[in-house]
Image (spheres, rainbow, N blue to C red):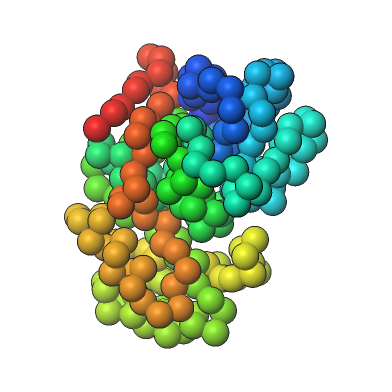
Amino acid sequence: MSQDQLKRKAAEAAIRYVDGGIIGVGTGSTVNHFIDLLADIKGRIEGTVSSSEASTKRLKSYGIAVFDLNATGELDLYVDGADESNSQLHLIKGGGGALTREKIIAGASRKFVCIADGSKLVDILGEFPLPVEVIPMARSHVARQLVKMGGTPVWRENFVTDNGNVILDVHNLRIMEPAKMEQAINNLAGVVTTGLFALRPADVLLLGTESGIKTIEP
Ligand code: 5RP
């Protein structure tokens, strides 16, 4: 099976968690499968809250309502992908640059179901460069601080987030204490969000593998 087919399988498994109401929707190629499947059952939900302009566009193309999070209150379910996960369901996210809105919706949701192909499960986070969203004027300052923390930050050039900020992708990290590192990076002046999701990890990880869906709950 191709990686894309495995992503599709994970998205299919997540559809089973949909039980009406307003669904939080993440961003990325795995979530795109989820949106396509959600379109088939759109009559069963009130609508969605979206984590990116790209997902909003796809949702609206199916006639699925997209609400402002300020108007919805807490959500029962958030479905999103990941770039890496460990077995505690600490994640690296933000490969698509939507990390800030993703983190907001994850924090506002009672259940965070993460969907991915099996290759995303790792022992130690950090092989995938950690995205950090930064206010543009703080880019060099934050980069110097990230070097002091042992990383090699690379400016994602020609990319602006939906919030008008820039991304530093931090290479060469072996993240042994994800929650501690998330807090330390969050504390740097100029950082909007880090793509580390450890303080609010996923609640369920659905992995598409050759032998079926692997469900991991901490
Ligand atoms: C976007 C994300 C995505 O969830 C992450 O990059 C995974 O993407 P894909 O499903 O395409 O592998 O965090 O900001």
Tell which residue pokes out farthest to the left in this image: 176
**Residue 196 position by quadrant:** bottom left
Residue at the image point whose x is 56% and y is 79% from the top: 136
State how many labels appear: 0
Residue at the image point whose x is 31% and y is 50% from the top: 198
Residue at the image point whose x is 51% and y is 58% from the top: 100
Residue 130 vs 74, above or below: the answer is below
Where residue 163 sits: x, y (%)?
62, 65
Residue 126 vs 117, above or below: the answer is below
Left or right of 163 in this view: 170: left
Residue at the image point whose x is 54% and y is 84% from the top: 137
Residue 27 vs 79, above or below: the answer is below
Question: For this rendering, which residue is in front, 109 or 99?
Answer: 109
Where residue 218 sits: x, y (%)?
24, 32
Let me know if residue 33 appears in the view.
no
Where residue 72 sits: x, y (%)?
59, 43
Tell which residue pokes out farthest to the top in this image: 211
**Residue 25 position by quadrant:** top right
Where residue 19 sits: x, y (%)?
53, 20
Left or right of 100 in this view: 213: left
Left or right of 125 in this view: 165: right
Residue 37 vs 199, above or below: the answer is above
**Residue 210 position by quadrant:** top left
Let me know if residue 170 appears in the view.
yes
Question: For this rendering, which residue is in front, 91 or 158?
Answer: 91
